Image: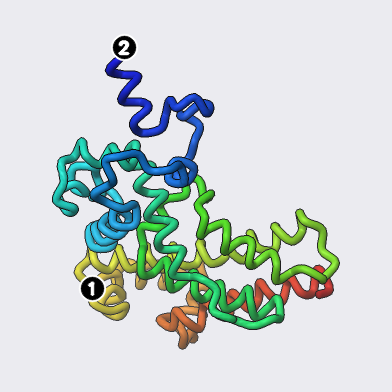
């Protein structure tokens, strides 16, 4: 019992300040450091984990793999994090720092539009980000700072708090949905060994031909025959984003 108590106190989970199991990693990080001083930083852990996830996917991030990358014993990592959930929170916070404010303008629409474009670019750089919401909550400092900044852009428009948050959430949902669809298509192309969309079309040509020749899907066939922006992801995304913003502006008269 004495050994367990000492171990808990060492990582701050039983220091008499409350239920340590309910504390987030951010609360624990702000607690004064105890000797001996840390050989690693949480930023180093996050950076190493992001590198692994960017190249091999989120599933490749394990405590053992992370320890190998950092050159420490696996058990040594548990001095800084309780497990993979903590690591994912550090990763999410680290990449959201890339979408920090850079003076994107004063008009609410410009702020939301530029932020949406940056978020899309962020997810495309770190595709694993779209997989994290089911495993960890979004309550990390940089994520909340981003939300705070976007909410502040709506100040003075006469919106109540719930409506303002719904506006932010609606734009975010569009970005996440559209970008996740793009990521899934990229994965399908890699699986099929296709370097470009025309390669994928060639692989699926017989299936497409059968569908079109059935005569059951005239509107879809018209798109296939007449569409000229099928591969223009940027245009498709910005068209959808502007439509969402137009709808918000019209509905709320802002």
- Residue extending farthest top: 1
In this picture, is 246 found above or below 138?
Answer: below
Judged left or right of residue 129, residue 237 is: right
Judged left or right of residue 174, residue 15 is: left
Which residue is at 28% across, 46% downward?
38
Which residue is at 49% across, 35% downward?
23
Q: Which mark is residue 10?
A: none
The residue carrying mark 2 is: 1
Q: Are marks 2 and 1 in contact (CB under 8 Å)?
A: no
In this picture, is 49 found above or below 179?
Answer: above
- The residue tagged with tag 2: helix, strand or loop? loop
Image position, residue 28 (x, y; %): 44, 41
Pick the front one: 86 or 165:
86
Q: Which mark is residue 194?
A: 1
Image position, residue 208 (x, y; %): 36, 70
Image position, residue 53 (x, y; %): 28, 57
Q: How many marks?
A: 2
Which residue is at 48% across, 40% downward?
24
Q: Which image quarter is the N terminus in? A: top left
Pick the front one: 35 or 89:
35
Badge 1 density bin: few <14, some 14–19, many ≥20, Cα 10 Å: some
Which residue is at 34% across, 31% downward?
10
Determine if residue 134 is in view: no
Q: Nearer the viewer, mark 2 or mark 1?
A: 2
Image position, residue 63 (x, y; %): 23, 42
Q: Which image quarter is the C terminus in? A: bottom right
Pick the front one: 167 or 44:
44
Q: Earlier in the sequence, mark 2 or mark 1?
A: 2
């Amino acid at each position: 019992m004495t050994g367990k108590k000492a171990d808990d106190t060492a990582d701050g989970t039983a220091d008499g300040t409350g239920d340590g199991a309910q504390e987030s990693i951010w609360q624990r990080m702000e607690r004064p450091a105890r000797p001996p001083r840390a050989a690693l930083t949480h930023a180093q852990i996050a950076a190493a984990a992001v590198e692994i996830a960017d190249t091999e996917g989120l599933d490749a991030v394990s405590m053992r793999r992370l320890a190998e990358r950092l050159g420490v014993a696996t058990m040594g990592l548990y001095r800084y994090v309780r497990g993979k959930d903590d690591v994912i929170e550090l990763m999410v916070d680290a990449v959201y720092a890339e979408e920090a404010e850079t003076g994107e303008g004063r008009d609410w629409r410009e702020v939301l539009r530029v932020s949406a474009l940056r978020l899309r670019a962020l997810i495309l750089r770190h595709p694993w980000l779209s997989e994290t919401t089911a495993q960890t909550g979004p309550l990390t400092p940089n994520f909340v700072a981003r939300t705070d900044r976007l909410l502040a852009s709506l100040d003075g428009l006469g919106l109540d708090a719930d409506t303002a948050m719904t506006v932010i959430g609606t734009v975010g949902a569009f970005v996440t949905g559209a970008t996740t669809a793009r990521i899934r298509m990229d994965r399908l192309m890699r699986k099929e060994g296709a370097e470009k969309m025309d390669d994928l079309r060639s692989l699926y040509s017989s299936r497409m031909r059968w569908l079109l020749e059935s005569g059951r899907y005239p509107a879809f066939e018209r798109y296939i025959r007449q569409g000229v922006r099928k591969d223009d992801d940027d245009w498709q995304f910005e068209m959808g984003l502007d439509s969402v913003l137009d709808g918000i502006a019209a509905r709320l008269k802002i």
